[in-house]
Amino acid sequence: MGSRIQRYHTIGLIAVAAAVLPFVLPGDYAIHLATVIGINTIVVLGLNLLMGYAGQVSLGQAAFVGIGAYTSGILTTKVGLSPWLALAAGVAVTSATGFIVGVPLLKLRGHYLAMGTLGFGMIVNIVLTQWGGLTGGTIGIMSIPPLAIGGFQFRSELSFYYLVAFSVLLTMSLAANIIDSRVGRAMRAVHGSEVAAETSGVDTARYKLQVFVLSAALAGYAGSLYAHHATYIHPGTFGFHQSIQLVVMAVLGGMASIWGAVFGAGAVTLIAENLRSFQEFSTIVFGGVLVIIMIFLPAGLWRGTGDVLQRLWRLRHRPAASRSVEDV
Amino acid sequence: MIPSAPYLLQYIVSGVTLGSIYGMIALGFTLIHNATGVVNFAQGEFVTYGALIAISCSAGLGLPMPLAVLIAVAAVTLLGALLELAAIRPARGSTVITLIIITVGASILLRGVAMWLWGPDALPMRHFSGETPMQIGHAAILPQHVWIMGIVVVTMFLLWVLGERTQVGKAMRACAMDTEAAQLVGIPASRMVMLSFALSGLLGGLAGAIVAPLAMAQYNMGIMLGLKGFAAAILGGMGNPLGAVVGGIVLGVLESIGASLQSGFKDAIAFGIMLLVLLAKPTGLFGRRSR
């Protein structure tokens, strides 16, 4: 599924929908939620490339979001750097961290990599909480300045929404380009069988590292955006729970689908928002969703349902020639 | 900056106690990993349920302590078997990434249910036989410390007997070595997999029930304990039962001494050690070939 043309059509459609959306939404709060969904989508797109195409798990992705957010927060409030430079620095710092952590971690496979990234996420969260002098400890950092162009500040919900929507579309095009490129083919080969890819001359270590660093950079970018949007950050936002929610988003939308990233980020953000005052239920729902989807629809809710329907259709209409359609 | 000698004993006692708990959790990881190749991310939740059920039985229902612990262990053993039946068995033959996310999902689900049933606050549990410490030099040793170490030693011995001296143990080890070959000689492999989950639940539940008096019990206690149990299993070399226990004790002592120097970063010590071992010597201290 998903030819090149089809993918760009999808992105075009999403662009139109994103441009119109604020006029349909009932108010500032809804626009705010759409912005949060957009920010999450950026992280999930990175996670999608990592999990769906390169077949590597990260259970510590929220740590990268946190590093991006804190880089922005610290550089603007303590050093007095301009928000745009801080944003760029956020991406640079997370990319560098992704590289430094990725070189040794990506030697691990499967469960070990999952645990390794989980441990990394925990350590980052402990550092954010304990290094009070720099990070403000459990209280966090307040009064982070908004992004601005000339005299115009991205302070209103609507202006920030368009900034995020633009970023999401840019990230999507980037992801689509990567999937269709040589790197994308190599990544899929790694997912299919690392040994086979290696044997046919694919430098698997290098590609895995590239995707890992890219996913870290995207998470860092989203984190910086979040910091300038919320203007207040604290370590609780970037913990294990958030890492898991990001994985749920990727899984729900289908791990190898660009459109799925928006769908997953949207569904999970809205569920979490509505169950905010019933944390135990949101936890139960997310846990249950993960198990059920992975057992019954491992291609994600969106495509999984499509696949099942398609298979039923074929069974009914061409019983003799029925072939199961497996993806990519 | 090692703590001065008189107090060192105190740190070692609490380190070994906590470490033997890590060791039991690590052993649970090892059993499941050997039987299925899966790392069960819901291992820590077994500990949570062991602790919380024991508290409900002893404090809530007023049952005598041994009975409360027994019920908790039995319930979590069942929970382990149920997890295998409901979540692992239907996904047999899935990719590693799928299995990882399934057990992660199961752990979140169980955590949510625990929060719903027992609430978000930490609950205390009565010590098994009082809280009057014994003074040995500068170290105060609680009766609960002795209970924990004793129960862990007995459990390890029984498990060793099960593994080495019984037919079932042989069958389990055969499945761990080569599932297909084991099936060919008539061993019901899928029952052995379920047994490994049940045993692993038993170990986790017991660990939770005996550590709760020292540590309090909370719906989310399993995250940290599970991770540290995993770190211990890695330290000892994944798949090696003796290594798991020794790894747990080493980790407990290091953590206890480390915490006396920098208490805020206590939890980072375990993950730091885990990452170091994963990267430097992935086969652990007692290196066997890892899979």
Image (spheres, coloured by chain):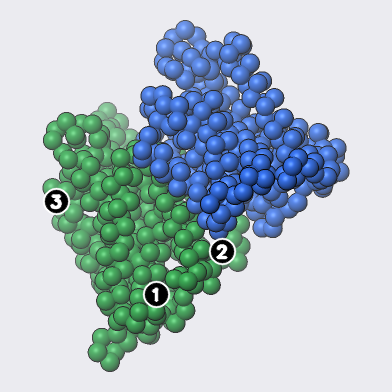
Q: Tell me if residue A264 can be seen.
A: no
Q: Colour of chain A?
A: green
| Residue type, mark 1 in image | Gly
- Circles 1, 2 touching at the beta carbon (< 8 Å): no
Label 1, label 2: how far apart the Cα atoms are: 28 Å
Question: Which disc is residue A181 wearing?
Answer: 3
Are the residues under marks 1 and 3 on the same chain? yes
Where is the C terminus of chain B found, in terms of image quarters? top left
Q: Earlier in the sequence, mark 2 or mark 3?
A: 3
Q: Which dot, 1 or 3, sits closer to the camera?
A: 1
Observer-nearest of B138 and A60: B138
* Disc 1: which residue: A73
- How packed is label 2: few (under 14 Cα within 10 Å), some, or many (20 or more)? some
Q: Which chain has been coloured blue in this picture?
A: B
Q: Which dot, 1 or 2, sits closer to the camera?
A: 1
Q: Earlier in the sequence, mark 1 or mark 3?
A: 1
Observer-nearest of A119 and A325: A119
| Residue type, mark 3 in image | Ser
Q: Position of residue B50 (x, y in %)?
A: 68, 40
Q: Chain of mark 3?
A: A
| Residue type, mark 2 in image | Leu
Q: Residue at x 28, y 60 (%)?
A: A95
Q: Residue at x 58, y 13 (%)?
A: B164
Question: Which disc is residue A275 wearing?
Answer: 2
Question: Which disc is residue A325 wearing?
Answer: none
Q: Is residue B115 left or right of residue B88?
A: right
> Quick check: A159 above or below A195?
below
